[in-house]
Image: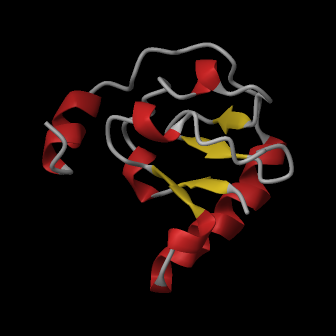
Amino acid sequence: MTHVVTENCAGCRFTDCVEVCPVSCFHGDENRIFIDPEACIDCGACLPLCPVNAICEDFDLEGDRSIWLHENAEKAPLLPVIKKKLPPLEGAGERRIALGHA
């Protein structure tokens, strides 16, 4: 099992979750973050910190959303590790509201 960053992260890139990760499994690009499933120890510390509920457990992915397990596994190892909180992207607050997480 592993945790997965889903579509809700795109355009936001809130990084509240990265500082609590004991194994530094978060990686990011200019638009979002990903979890390296090889590094994730399934501690769950990140789950309550995501303000847009972008992180979920892999077994909670249903239907088309299962693609996010593959996306995280493929992209995370190619991107730099994020260990410190970064500013959210411009427009992240509006995206958060649009996603229903005011």
Closer to us: 91 or 68? 68
Please name the residue shown 63% across and 45% down the image: 34
Where is residue 51? Give x, y as percent.
33, 35
Q: From this view, report whether residue 15 is shown above or below residue 42.
A: above
Q: Nearer the viewer, residue 1 or 76?
A: 1
In the image, is residue 7 above or below residue 70?
above
Is residue 8 in sight in this rendering?
yes
Q: How many marks?
A: 0
Q: Position of residue 40 (x, y in %)?
A: 77, 45
What residue is drawn where x is 28% and y is 31%? 92
In this picture, residue 58 sits left or right of residue 11 = right
Name the residue: 42% across, 36% down.
48
Relative to 70, is 77 above or below? above
Q: Left of 77 or right of it: where is 42?
A: left
Residue 25's x, y, as percent? Answer: 75, 36
Q: Is residue 10 visible?
A: no
Q: Give the image location of residue 64, x and y in percent.
A: 48, 82
Point out the image quarter for the N terminus: bottom right
* Residue occupying image coordinates x 77% and y 29%: 80
Instruction: Judge from the rendering whether residue 88 lies leftward or rightward of residue 39; answer left or right.
Output: left
Q: Quadrant of residue 50?
A: top left
